[in-house]
Image (spheres, helix red, strand yellow):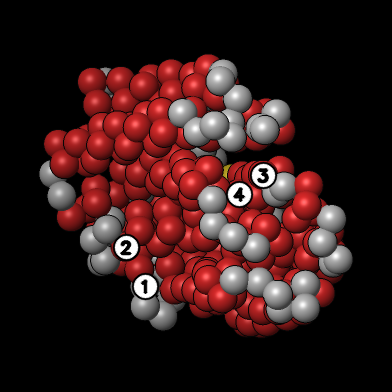
Amino acid sequence: MTPEIVTDRGDPSRWRTLVGLVRISKVSVYLHFFPWALAALLLSPAALQRPGAVAALALFLLSSAGIVAATATVDDIIGLRNGSDAANYIRPGFRRDLRRKPLLSGALTERQAIVFAVFAEIFAFVTGFAAFAVLDWDVPISAVLIFVACAVLGPQYSGGLRFSYHLGGSEFLLGVGTAGGFLFPYLAVEGRWTMVGVLQGVLMGLWLVMLVSCSNVGDRDGDAAVGRRTLPVAAPMWVVKGALVTYLIISVTTIAALATSPVMPWWTALALLPATALHAAQLRLAITRDRWRTARVAAFVAYDLGFVGLAVATFFAG
């Protein structure tokens, strides 16, 4: 069965290129910016009243978008070169919209993507350092180090050090990078570490890993063909399923720790109950029924609900 494919090849050239750049940047994927939004919500009134705090937050948002764009674009460039994107997007029995992959659809050339990735990385550093500058660099050194690590290591997901091609590298970089995306703006403006901040960063990173774990199962054949040793490629399925169970246990434990904090409202755990229930449903779908695509959808919705629960609880935090 030949998959039904939708492309951009009929669009006018300039508009097609512009839309292709937006798509390859993944900046429209709103969940990438959940960590920044939570960091802004968690800031104390005193921190928000610091000179330059609001401007710094805006610049950190732009910088986060630059990191996401550079990372996603490099991933698509490598996916085009090694054929993994073609293998995963043009599979018998699947209807895939190739407009999500502008290099495959013809909306962008590889040269355009490379130039854009370089520009996005430069933009990330310029806006990030500008954010520290408007705070007069009166920030913890850890905030600067975490920012630099996120900006440098993000594109290494597929390019450079190729984290996602090594066992555990995908989970590590996505989890740590997402937590870092929460921590560097929070630490810079707040000026100190807090346990609540660390726990929220951990949850954001962990929930994204739970989502991507299901995606990696669906992409297993294409990843294996190009030597991408994700967990589903390198390990038997019982290990993959065991990892999901472990993630859920860590999530529940972290939520319990967050709910016991005197800073958070007493009903924090209740606010996160819908997300936890969906994560449990994700495990049931994946582990007992092998419905990984449906489990991935459950993980997407759980990520949204988890963010909403954290955001609401944080808004009412004391």
Quadrant where the image shows the N terminus: top left
Q: Which mark is residue 202?
A: none
Q: Residues within 10 Å of mark 2 (few under 14, many from 20)?
A: some
Quarter of the view holding residue 151 = bottom right
Q: Earlier in the sequence, mark 3 or mark 4?
A: 4
Q: Let me know if residue 270 appears in the view.
A: yes
Quadrant where the image shows the C terminus: top right
Q: Look at mark 2 in the image and give the residue it sits on.
A: 169
Q: Residues within 10 Å of mark 3 (few under 14, many from 20)?
A: many
Q: Earlier in the sequence, mark 2 or mark 3?
A: 3
Quarter of the view holding residue 279 = top left
Q: Secondary structure at mark 2?
A: helix
Q: Residue at x 71, y 33 (%)?
A: 315
Tell us which disc is closer to us: 2 or 3. Answer: 3
Q: CA distance from mark 2 to mark 3?
A: 29 Å
Tell us which disc is closer to us: 1 or 3. Answer: 3
Q: CA distance from mark 1 to mark 4?
A: 24 Å
Q: CA distance from mark 2 to mark 4?
A: 21 Å
Are the two marked residues, 2 and 1, in contact with CB atoms closer than 8 angstroms?
yes
Q: Look at mark 3 in the image and give the residue it sits on.
A: 42
Q: CA distance from mark 3 to mark 4?
A: 11 Å
Q: Amino acid at mark 3?
A: Leu
Q: Look at mark 1 in the image and give the residue it sits on.
A: 162
**Residue 190 place in picture, x, y as percent:** 67, 58
Q: Secondary structure at mark 4?
A: helix
Q: Look at mark 4 in the image and give the residue it sits on.
A: 35
Residue 196 relative to residue 15: left or right: left
**Residue 142 place in picture, x, y as percent:** 53, 71
Q: Amino acid at mark 2?
A: Gly
Are the two marked residues, 3 and 4, in contact with CB atoms closer than 8 angstroms?
no
Tell us which disc is closer to us: 2 or 1. Answer: 2
